[in-house]
Amino acid sequence: MQKRGQGSKAALIDVNKAIGACKRCKDWQGALLLLQGLAAQNLQADVISYTAAIGACEKSGRWQQGLRLLHEVFASGLQPNAITFTAALALCDKSGRWEEALALLAQCGLLRLQADLALLNAAMSACAKGSWTCALELLAGAGRRSVQTDLISANACVSACAKAVQWQQALWILAGMEPKRLEPDVITYSAAVSALESEWELALHFLRLGKPNAITYNSAITALGACSQWRLALELIREMPSRHVRATTVTHNAAITACERASEWQRAFRAFLRLLQGSEGSPEGSNKGAAEADVVTLNAALSAASHAAEWQQAPGGLFLEVWGGFWAVRLASPDSPDVVILF
């Protein structure tokens, strides 16, 4: 009897390892099949089984299946641990269900589970998607839980402030990082620049700190556009190659929109033309991976054109025409054949 029990335990460990492998491979279906197949082997799933399966669902973006598994844990009479709740909170983060994340955190308290840093960070990240106030409350209350927050905590909350354009609160979080000896990274600065949409001078200050990436530049150019600082926006896009940062479609769209908002329609069209030619924001002599125009780009170009008296022809041989019910952007150049984009 004892040997049978030991054999069952060893078999369950093997299945749990297989479910963990499915998690690493983002194979949520395989994880669920293994979990469901335990009964056929006369094995009872334990908390480790469910936690690994929930993690597989989280890695695969299947939040509904993952939360269903959490309910099964309670229904089966098992006691979930902090790791189980952390996996479930990550599901809430991926699905934007911040209210459910708070409910799960409260449930941890009812079960007298000690919230650790990973669990709190998952809850803050989930709240950052929908409630900046809740994210900051969790950050401020971490000390009462005897949890020392880290860079992930700060970045989640600065990102929450950025989404809500709460730049004062974002600066408060940044100020609190130094006493904790936390070094801001590119995520911190990018989120801070995004939060400073209405404070372009501060946005430029944070852009110069650290090593910016395309996201940081995109946030800064967007902030400049919102404040009608189109000249500075164009200067930023021109300096990107010297800092080894490649402009993206979002970068060009932000610059075009900045010009359009300031009624600088000719400059907006020139920026659009440079995007089509791939001549700006990329390392010199290289168009590899160059940004391409999308619907947002074309809408911004059309919006700029609508403000122009001679809207049918823009500088540089760029024409807007109607071809068979489609709008067309035609680039006419004496050195190359016409380039036409239909939309």
Image (cartoon, helix red, strand yellow):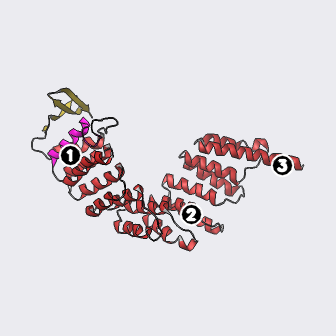
User: Which residue is denoted by mark 3 in the rendering?
Assistant: 6
* Residue lying at 67% horizontally and 55% vertically, measured from the top left: 73
Report if residue 67 lies within the magenta region: no
Mark 1 lies on a secondary structure that is helix
In the rendered view of the protein, which quadrant contains the C terminus?
Answer: top left
The answer to whether residue 35 is visible is: no
In the figure, is residue 31 to the left or right of 12? left
Residue type highlighted by circle 2: Leu
N-term-proximal mark, 1 vs 3? 3
Q: Sort mark 3 into few (<14), some (14-19) or many (20+) by Cα contacts within 10 Å.
A: few
Residue type highlighted by circle 3: Gln
In the rendered structure, find residue 289 and report the number of the disc placed on it: none
N-term-proximal mark, 2 vs 3? 3
Task: Give coordinates of residue 201: x percent, y percent.
Answer: 26, 63
In the rendered structure, find residue 303 and report the number of the disc placed on it: 1
Q: From which residue to which does the magenta span run? A: 264-283
In the figure, is residue 186 to the left or right of 254? right
Report if residue 268 lies within the magenta region: yes
Task: Give coordinates of residue 54: x percent, y percent.
Answer: 61, 50
* Closer to the camera in the image, 313 or 291: 291
Q: Quick one: which residue is furthest to the right in this view?
A: 1
Task: Give coordinates of residue 70: x percent, y percent.
Answer: 63, 54
Mark 3 lies on a secondary structure that is helix
* Closer to the camera in the image, 325 or 66: 66
In the rendered structure, find residue 117 and report the number of the disc placed on it: 2
Q: Quick one: which residue is furthest to the bottom in this view?
A: 144
The answer to whether residue 310 is visible is: yes
* Residue lying at 55% horizontally and 53% vertically, measured from the top left: 91
N-term-proximal mark, 2 vs 1? 2
Residue mark closest to the camera, 2 vs 1: 2
